[in-house]
Amino acid sequence: MMLVKENINEFERSSNPYKAMGVGKIFQIEKWLKEYEFTKDMYHINDDLTIDINVQTGLSINKPRIASRGLRGLPDYINFNIWEGRCFMNWNLFTNMRGCPKIVTENFYINGNPLRSLKGIPKEVGGRFFIAKICGFTQEDIMARCNVRYEDITLSENPGEESFKALKNLHNK
């Protein structure tokens, strides 16, 4: 049996009717953030639909959890703006950084991804920048596009292409 709301007053009162009806971009963004364990006190959705994150206070290293999820990239509707705290997006299947934060106030971890492009690289990282050496980018490539505090870029060793294939196969099941 399907329930039909016969009275408009039964809908949740909100400044955004799309959100109240469970449709629209903001609803989509909030649903994705919840899936990846962001709580409402950790994010703010800006008027331009970019997302500010604050994960500096009392947060376990395991949450929110974007790292090691087998993501091929961020959905088109997810565009981070400012990320206060350490940003873990490592060990996925990203080929570029589209949607990644424009500013990260602490360390940015993108290592373990088979990046082919620096598209979407943050403009500023306030801590260390971790990226896989296997991707072929140099510190100079990164510094030309991103202001990394203290120029601290770690080109990490990855197990190699076989590990990327294994991770990809694991998440295709």
Image (cartoon, rainbow, N blue to C red):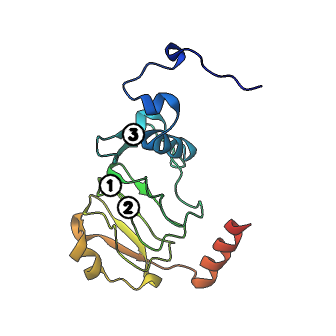
Secondary structure beneath disc 1? loop
Q: Identify which amino acid the numbered label 1 is placed on.
A: Glu
Figure disc tally: 3
Mark 3 lies on residue: 43
Seen in the picture, residue 69 relative to 118 is either above or below; the reply is above
Q: Which residue is mark 1?
A: 106
Q: Residue at x 27, y 58 (%)?
A: 126
46 and 134: which is toward the camera: 46
Query: Residue at 24% across / 72% down in the picture?
Result: 145
Q: CA distance from mark 2 to mark 3?
A: 18 Å
Q: Point out the residue furthest to the front here.
A: 6
Query: What residue is at 42 percent from the left and 53 percent from the top?
Result: 78
Q: 10 Å neighbourhood of mark 1: few (<14), some, or many (≥20)?
A: many
Q: Given the current orientation, which residue lies at the most extreme right position?
A: 1
- In 3D space, how far apart are the residues under numbered discs 1 and 3 (Cα atoms)? 16 Å
Label 3 SS: strand
User: Which is more toward the observer, 61 or 118?
Assistant: 118
- Pinpoint residue 4: horizontal percent, then vertical percent: 64, 22
Q: Quick check: 36 left or right of 104?
A: right
What's the amino acid at mark 2? Phe
Q: Quadrant of residue 56?
A: top left
Identify which residue, 105 or 115, lies in the foreground.
Answer: 115
Q: Are marks 1 and 2 in contact (CB under 8 Å)?
A: yes
Q: Position of residue 35 (x, y in %)?
A: 57, 45
Q: CA distance from mark 1 to mark 2?
A: 7 Å
Q: Which residue is mark 2?
A: 108
Which three-letter amino acid code belongs to the residue tagged 3? Answer: Tyr
Q: Residues within 10 Å of mark 2 (few under 14, many from 20)?
A: many
Residue 60 spot, x, y in % from top left: 51, 43
Q: On residue 42, which mark appears?
A: none
- Up-down: is 66 above or below 154? above
